[in-house]
Image (cartoon, grey):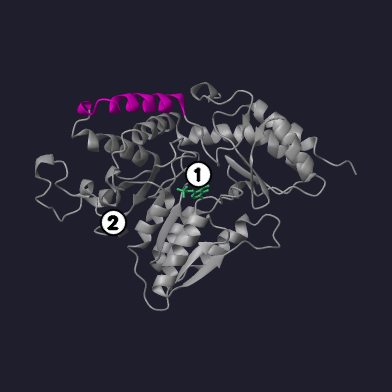
């Protein structure tokens, strides 16, 4: 795959290495939004079936991306909504506990903490081995060891949002199944850029913000609820999530049945006539590119960065536990942080600082030149000792 920059409207003077912060919109999504706005001028053009068809299409595309049945996909406005939905349907026996990662993204951390408080369950926070220069292997092992028959739920990100450390979802999902724990994954920082297979990873609920690696608009996320959540209770009582909702003439023949499978967990007004078409365009494109090709592109792109870091004695995580699309650099002292901030600003290089990591996140809109400029900025920030 070649760079797909032409499909985006990025400022050509900026090196945007920050997809983990917010993915840029595709031109096709912008156009879909403009078309949708114009359509809203004349509501007569919005037919009753349009309240359902847009969602159906988006769910189908997401289902293809994560390998599930479209009926198990639900539209959510944010990850916190998805976590609250999932956790609201998980019960807890006395003595059971929940597991979360150290430095988990706040929406996940607060959600599981609240669930523990409500259920008088202990929250076990599993962190990396502080002495390990590359903590990937030992952290994954610690997570696996911490899951026991007393674990009610594990809530964790697919890759660490601060540094891209990759978790062994397949082994963790298997351990959860063996021990009877519910496995909730925050897929926000990898779904769309790295493999996500809810069946292979035995994930019970996958919660994703849409505005990063899915190139969606802010305000629309997407989720998967597996069979562990069949027959559960949604957070709210939207008319759209009832089995008779398509029959607009008879809505007050109140139907107490929710729609089948995970449709019951859709947020109210899930038909969002502007945001849905935007997400639809980007999901269509991601499926066309394929996540494998996106991952390969990111891997090739970041190879010179890895080579440079190794040449300067920077410790990098083992290949098996590294993401290709999201890399957190812990730079040694010889890199002057103030100088680096200045150099990045001067060269209009957009990256993030997350928990002391210089977080570099790349996607198909980036070019080899973006990485070269970053390397130049890093090199110019070294103090010659
Ligand atoms: C792992 C992770 N989850 C969730 C979010 C944000 O999700 P939301 O804005 O829907 O709460 C982020 C944002 O950076 C993230 O990195």
Q: Position of residue 253 (x, y in %)?
A: 9, 50
Q: Earlier in the sequence, mark 1 or mark 2?
A: 1
Q: Which residue is mark 2?
A: 234
Task: State whether label 2 is within 8 Å of ligand 1.
Answer: no
Residue 201 is at least partly visible in this image: no
Q: Which residue is mark 1?
A: 190
Q: Residue at x 33, y 52 (%)?
A: 225
Q: Position of residue 287 (x, y in %)?
A: 41, 32
| Mark 2: few/some/many CA within 10 Å (<14, 14-19, 20+) | many
Q: Position of residue 103 (x, y in %)?
A: 58, 58
Judged left or right of residue 233, residue 92 is right
Q: Secondary structure at mark 1?
A: loop
Q: Considering depth in this image, is 191 or 246 the residue closer to the camera?
A: 246
Q: Residue furthest front?
A: 41
Could you say which quadrant of the image residue 150 lies in?
bottom left
Q: Considering depth in this image, is 239 or 309 the residue closer to the camera?
A: 239
Against 355, residue 291 (above or below) is: above
Instruction: Magenta stretch: give its range.
Output: 26-45
Q: Residue at x 52, y 69 (%)?
A: 124
Q: Position of residue 127 (x, y in %)?
A: 59, 63
Instruction: Based on the picture, tell me whether residue 205 belongs to the magenta stretch.
Output: no
Q: Considering depth in this image, is 23 or 308 the residue closer to the camera?
A: 23
């Amino acid at each position: 795959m070649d760079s797909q920059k032409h499909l985006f409207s990025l400022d050509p003077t900026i090196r945007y290495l920050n997809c983990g912060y917010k993915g840029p919109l595709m031109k096709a999504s912008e156009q879909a939004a403009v078309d949708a706005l114009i359509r809203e001028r004349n509501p007569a053009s919005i037919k009753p079936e349009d309240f359902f068809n847009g969602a159906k299409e988006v769910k189908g595309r997401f289902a293809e991306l994560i390998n599930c049945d479209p009926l198990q996909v639900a539209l959510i406005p944010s990850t916190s909504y998805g976590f609250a939905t999932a956790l609201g349907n998980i019960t807890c026996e006395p003595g059971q506990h929940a597991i979360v990662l150290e430095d988990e993204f706040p929406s996940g951390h607060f959600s599981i903490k609240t669930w523990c408080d409500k259920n008088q369950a202990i929250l076990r926070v599993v962190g990396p081995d502080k002495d390990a220069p590359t903590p990937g292997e030992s952290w994954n092992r610690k997570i696996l060891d911490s899951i026991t028959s007393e674990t009610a739920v594990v809530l964790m990100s697919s890759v660490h949002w601060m540094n891209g450390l990759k978790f062994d979802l397949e082994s963790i999902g298997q351990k959860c199944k063996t021990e009877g724990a519910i496995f909730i994954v925050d897929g926000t920082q990898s779904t769309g850029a790295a493999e996500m297979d809810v069946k292979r990873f035995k994930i019970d609920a996958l919660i994703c913000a849409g505005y990063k690696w899915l190139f969606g608009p802010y305000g629309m996320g997407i989720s998967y609820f597996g069979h562990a959540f069949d027959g559960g209770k949604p957070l709210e009582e939207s008319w759209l999530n009832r089995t008779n909702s398509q029959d607009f003439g008879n809505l007050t023949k109140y139907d107490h049945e929710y729609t089948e499978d995970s449709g019951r967990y859709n947020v109210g007004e899930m038909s969002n006539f502007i945001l849905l078409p935007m997400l639809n365009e980007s999901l269509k494109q991601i499926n066309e590119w394929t996540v494998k090709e996106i991952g390969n592109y990111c891997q090739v792109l970041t190879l010179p960065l890895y080579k440079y870091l190794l040449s300067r004695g920077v410790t990098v995580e083992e290949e098996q536990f590294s993401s290709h699309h999201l890399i957190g650099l812990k730079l040694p002292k010889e890199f002057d942080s103030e100088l680096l901030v200045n150099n990045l600003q001067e060269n209009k290089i957009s990256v993030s600082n997350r928990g002391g990591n210089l977080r570099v996140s790349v996607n198909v809109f980036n070019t080899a030149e973006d990485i070269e400029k970053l390397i130049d900025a890093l090199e110019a920030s070294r103090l010659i000792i």
